[in-house]
Image (tube, rainbow, N blue to C red):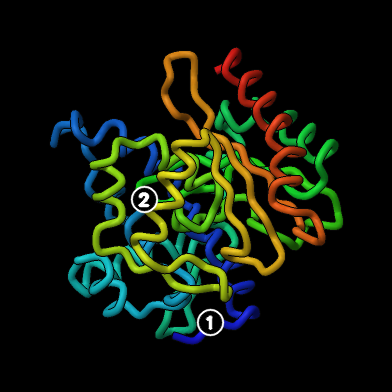
Amino acid sequence: MKYKEKTLFSWRRCAIIARTCAISAQLFAMSSSSVLGKRDRIAGLDRGLRLIEAFDETHPRLSPSTAARRTGMTRAAARRYLLTLQQLGYVESDGKLFSLTPRVLRLGWSYVDSANVARIAQPFLQRITSVLGGAAYFAVQDGDDVVFVARSGNRLVQNVGFMLGARVQANFASAGIAMLSCWPQEEVERWLSGRVFLPFTPHTVTTVDGVRELIATARSRGYALLEQQLDPGMRGIAVPIRSRTSEVVGGISVSLPMGSETTSAATSRALPVLREVEHSLLALL
């Protein structure tokens, strides 16, 4: 399989933030859908959010027919929802195809702005970058993916790594591997089952056994280390973040240029700082 072009991936990282439009609703639904009765559930809101999420990097523009296929609605229903979203300013249309407008980002940023854990983590991310350089992130698990809800980095690394709000498959991010390492093994196997791992660099781990080994290594070490999985020449180190009740609430990571620094030297330099932040957050969460 050929490696994806760098320009395509850069565009993908920019486009993928649109999927954050329903993060807050998704996280709420994950915790409450099992107990929400039919009388309390608003089906129209559910369908509207699913339709917004039907737009992604490979489907930036949708016809009513395509939207219907991607959401399981009828074409007529999909068209009505698209027209309603257009009236509200969340999508625009050329008469045939619909696409998201920047207004949809308000929904995703509502989560970023209101997330208590992300706000607490921000000053610690700034400390990480002031000591280590690079870019520091706080990520949370959302289904099978990770979402980056806080970020710190100087101007030299603004175009490196993950955008705030980006969603990626967990194996591509050191924070994702760190959080997966806290899962029971049967849940890890479920996550791995039938999953396709695409290569973004010549070093991307693309086999189930390889990703399983990354998770197992992180579990035994207590931290995750990834090198050149998404960006050539970049190294990620991460630790899981737990609350006082031992619940895993996210992962703190730092992305550093590899340069001439060895893996051992980078780990020795970064891990004490990450551990300090981990223990500090434990007292606050």
Q: Residues within 10 Å of mark 1 (few under 14, many from 20)?
A: few
Query: Nearer the N terminus, badge 1 or badge 2?
Result: 1
**Residue at left 38%, top 66%?**
207
Q: Is residue 154 above or below residue 245?
A: below
Residue sitting at 64 percent across and 56 percent down? Answer: 163
What residue do we see at 43% from left, 84% from top? 95
Does dot 2 land on a helix, a strand or a loop? loop
User: Image quadrant for the C terminus?
Assistant: top right
**Mark 1 or 2: the one toward you:** 1
The residue identified by callout 2 is 144
Residue, disc 1? 3
Q: CA distance from mark 1 to mark 2?
A: 23 Å
Q: Is residue 265 above or below residue 14?
A: above
Rendered image: mark on residue 18: none
**Quarter of the N terminus within the rendering:** bottom left
What's under tag 2, amino acid-wise?
Asp
Viewer-closest of 15 and 183: 183
Snapshot quadrant of residue 122 = top right
**Residue 48: image location, x then y, percent:** 33, 56
C-beta proximity under 8 Å, tags 1 and 2:
no
Q: Secondary structure at mark 1?
A: loop
Q: Nearer the viewer, residue 37 or 119?
A: 119
Residue in the picture at 58% in, 42% down: 149
- Would residue 5 appear left or right of 133 to someone viewing this image? left
Q: Position of residue 213 (x, y in %)?
A: 41, 52
- Left or right of 231 on screen, residue 195: left
**Quarter-wise, where is residue 11 in the image?**
bottom right
Q: Amino acid at mark 1?
A: Tyr
Q: Give the image quarter of residue 58.
A: bottom left
Q: Percent x, y for residue 32?
A: 27, 31
Above or below: residue 140 compared with residue 15: above
